[in-house]
């Protein structure tokens, strides 16, 4: 007997979403570029775009996992460490994707970052060096100003940045607008490549999906 059920095949986007939901919870990396922080941001954005709480809940579950694994032994790097995770928290709060007191949530990260003098760090890279920490200090400072909160960094520390090899003229101003797309590689993932593709926001499935969101969305 012929079935009257209409079978609608999943689109590539739907397959990518399902694959990301299936695999991301078991990831070891909790960082911004290649781990759970970047993927959590994607799910919060995608959930708001689709007006679907399932994806927002997935983002929340990943944040819970990140918080459970966060400890003082994690590096301060932007790609996989504390400054990138803190940047992601500020991003979510500034875009009103989550609620929370950033100064309380990021207090331990702020203390770790302040212990690193910008003039003494030889690594100037985004992923593991001074440029990444600069992004964290910038987003935290601008976030505090936007919310009319106490700045998490002393003026002396901000002056140290202005005297470093990476001058931060935007620190303390409202001109720093957090944009995740600045860090995402522009690439495509074919369906046959899905099972071997990385998951993260910078080079993987989450980044491809994020770049497919309307540019005016976030």
Image (tube, helix red, strand yellow):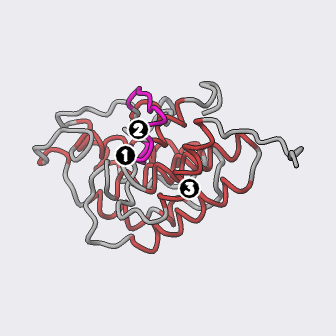
- Front residue of 2 and 6: 2
- Residues at marks 1 and 2, CA–CA distance in whole angstroms: 6 Å
Question: Decide: marks 1, 2 in contact (CB < 8 A)?
Answer: yes
Question: Decide: marks 2, 3 in contact (CB < 8 A)?
Answer: no
Residue displayed at 39% across by 34% down = 183
Q: Which mark is residue 44?
A: none
Instruction: Tell whether 70 sits left or right of 58.
Output: left
- Front residue of 80 and 164: 80
- Residues at marks 2 and 3, CA–CA distance in whole angstroms: 17 Å
In the picture of the structure, the residue carrying the numbered disc 1 is: 196
How dense is the environment of label 2, judged by Cα within 10 Å: few (below 14), some, or many (20 and up)?
Answer: few
Is residue 189 magenta-colored?
Answer: yes
Nearer the N terminus, badge 2 or badge 3? 3
Nearer the N terminus, badge 1 or badge 3? 3
Residue displayed at 70% across by 56% down = 54
Is residue 10 magenta-colored?
Answer: no
Residue displayed at 56% across by 53% down = 149
Q: Is residue 73 above or below residue 10?
A: below
Q: Residue furthest front?
A: 1
How dense is the environment of label 3, judged by Cα within 10 Å: few (below 14), some, or many (20 and up)?
Answer: some
The C terminus lies in which quarter of the figure?
A: top right
List x then y, in percent, for residue 85.
41, 55
Nearer to us: label 2 or label 3: 2
In the picture of the structure, the residue carrying the numbered disc 2 is: 193
In the picture of the structure, the residue carrying the numbered disc 3 is: 21
- What range of the chain is rendered magenta? 185-202
């Amino acid at each position: 007997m012929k079935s009257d059920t209409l079978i609608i095949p999943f689109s590539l986007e739907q397959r990518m979403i399902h694959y990301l939901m299936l695999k991301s919870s078991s990831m070891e990396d909790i960082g911004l570029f290649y781990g759970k922080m970047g993927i959590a941001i994607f799910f919060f954005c995608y959930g708001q775009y689709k007006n679907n709480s399932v994806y927002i809940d997935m983002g929340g579950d990943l944040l819970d996992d990140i918080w459970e694994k966060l400890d003082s032994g994690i590096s301060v790097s932007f790609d996989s460490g504390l400054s990138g995770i803190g940047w992601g928290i500020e991003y979510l709060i500034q875009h009103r994707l989550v609620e929370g007191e950033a100064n309380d949530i990021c207090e331990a990260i702020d203390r770790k970052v302040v212990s690193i003098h910008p003039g003494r760090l030889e690594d100037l890279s985004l992923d593991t060096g001074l440029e990444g920490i600069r992004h964290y200090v910038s987003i935290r400072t601008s976030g505090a100003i936007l919310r009319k909160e106490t700045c998490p960094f002393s003026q002396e520390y901000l002056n140290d940045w202005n005297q470093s090899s990476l001058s931060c003229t935007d620190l303390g101003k409202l001109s720093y607008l957090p944009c995740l797309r600045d860090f995402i590689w522009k690439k495509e993932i074919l369906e046959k490549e899905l099972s071997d593709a990385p998951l993260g926001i910078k080079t993987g499935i989450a980044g491809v999906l994020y770049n497919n969101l309307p540019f005016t969305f976030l």
